[in-house]
Image: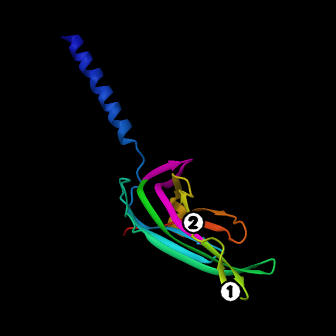
Amino acid sequence: MRQLIVFSEILLIVVAYGCNIVDDKPVPGKDYYGTLKLVYSREAPGFTSTVEMDVTMDKDGNVFITEPDQVDYSGVEEVTIDEDLLKVEEIGTVTITSLSGEYKILGGKEYLSVNASTLIDGTIQFWGWDDDLGWVSGYPNPIPFSVDDPVESPMNFSMDDAVISGAIIGTTIPGASPFGSQTYKWTLILSVMP
């Protein structure tokens, strides 16, 4: 009988310890709301495309991010290269799916870690100027391209930055002539719910 009591006490200690491990998951202790934005822009042809999502995080660390609609973009620009006049046009869509978020403590600081699957799918076309014929297409058809996840997940946004002025994670890729650089910039802006 005594062995059964000792075994029961040990079992209770193990269960209590296990519960404490689960309960030790960090939580923010406050409710937050805000926006998450992806801005895709290019220098030439010049354009900016913005996809915006609503974000909420409750005091227990549960994160909700709205699935955005697909966003269309286009840009056309004339550029001069070695005294030749060219016209460049890019048309496409930005699609963001598989959004998820998690509250984390990293190095003693609070972060909202976001996973997102991003696809930029489009076409590029360019023409050369001919004084007799006008604009002449460089290729008979637009050139298709796609970019998957230009900013790698998970993206760890500083909660302090997000609340003060906006936490930014992104990259700029230099463009080969006649295309300008491409910028992919994610911004998280949060406020504490009253």
Query: Which residue carries the number 2 mark?
Result: 185
Q: Which residue is drawn at the image coordinates 32% and 36% (left, top)?
A: 19
Q: Secondary structure at mark 1?
A: loop
Which of the pair 143/160 is nearer the observer?
143
Q: Is residue 112 magenta?
A: yes
Q: Residue furthest right?
A: 82
Q: Nearer the viewer, residue 10 or 168?
A: 168
Amino acid type, residue under disc 1 in the picture: Leu
Quarter containing the C terminus: bottom left
Q: Secondary structure at mark 2?
A: strand
Judge whether residue 135 can be spotted in this image: yes
Q: Could you classify mark 2 by the number of other residues whose Cα lies within 10 Å: few (under 14), some (14-19), or many (20 or more)?
A: some
Please state which amino acid type lies under the numbered disc 2.
Lys
Query: Range of the magenta residues?
Result: 102-124
Q: Is residue 9 above or below residue 90?
A: above
Reply yes or no: does residue 145 show up in magenta.
no
The outermost residue toward the bottom is 132
How many angstroms separate mark 2 from mark 1 (CA)? Answer: 40 Å
Residue 103 image point, x, y percent:
44, 52
Q: Is residue 178 left or right of residue 42?
A: right
Q: Main secondary structure of the magenta part?
A: strand
Outermost residue to the front:
132
Q: Position of residue 105 (x, y in %)?
A: 50, 49
Question: Mark 1: few, some, or many residues within 10 Å (few <14, many ≥20)?
Answer: few
Give the residue displayed 56% in from the left and 75% down from the top. 48
Residue 44, position as x, y percentages in the image: 66, 75
Task: Tell me the residue that label 1 is attached to.
Answer: 133
Pick the front one: 182 or 15: 182
Q: How is the image coloured?
A: rainbow
